[in-house]
Image: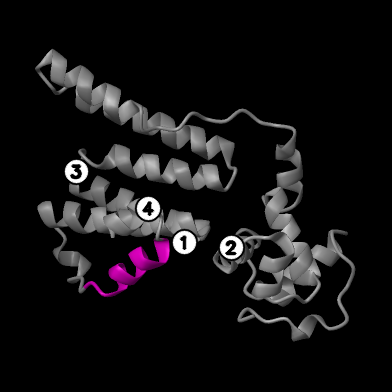
Amino acid sequence: MELALTRQDAPQALQVFDELDFPDRANWLGGAAHYYGSILQLRGEALTLLGWLNEAELALQSVLELYQEQGIRMGLWRIQLSLGKSYQAATDSNRTGAAFTAARTQIEELAATIADENLRENFRRRTIAMIPPTQPLTPRHPAKQEFGGLTKRERQVAVVVAQGLSNQEIADELVVSVKTVEAHVTRILSKLGFSSRAQIAAWAVDRGLASAPQDLDSLSTDS
């Protein structure tokens, strides 16, 4: 899973996860809890890459609760870091800042337990550097909030979805790959809480982004 995520191949990472045989969670104690928790964290990160942010948050929060229940401190900052990145992808600045602050606090607490000064500073420097800077609000932020958190490109995709175009036709229209279009559509569905392209089309029309297509019901999630 970790190798797939390094390659930014979230679907492959999730496929690997689905093929794993997990024991009953009641047996996740001590080292087993840390091991299986780290795998669940990778699943949460894969979901974030796909734009399935609600599912990503649920997965990462479950790991956070597991570690807290088991008294596992070593991996807590990594979970908060992953949560912060998920919140950042959702443009939730408040929860992004809170998660990154929690990660920094946990890093400092762990660093304080390292007796050797050089090792302590090396650990602190390397881990703090992994925390992305919190981006200040830009003029685009209000627009993203108004349109369900969709980026400008995602709004463009929503418009062509409303025109009844297939993913291949959208790719040709926007001069991108079909995989890129599929990823955009997946993120749009997740951000808006929808399950079909017809809902995206109706939303785009309702927001004044597009004219009503002749037959919204003809749109499907499979095209």
- What is the x, y in percent for residue 14? 36, 67
Magenta residues span: 10-20
Residue in the image at 68% along x and 56% along y? 154
Q: Amino acid at mark 2?
A: Ser
Is residue 106 shown above or below 190?
above
Q: Nearer the viewer, residue 86 or 29?
A: 86
- Residue shown at 54%/66% (left/top)? 179
Q: Is residue 86 above or below residue 180?
A: above
Q: CA distance from mark 4 to mark 2?
A: 17 Å
Q: Which mark identifies residue 71?
A: 3
Give the residue pinned by disc 4: 60
Q: Which residue is mark 2?
A: 190
Q: Are marks 4 and 2 in contact (CB under 8 Å)?
A: no
Q: Which residue is mark 1?
A: 55
Asked if residue 50 can be seen in this view, the reply is: yes
Label 3, label 2: how far apart the Cα atoms are: 33 Å
Within 10 Å of disc 2 (Cα), the crowding (few <14, some 14-19, many 20+) is: some
In the current view of this chain or complex, which residue is farthest to the top?
Answer: 117
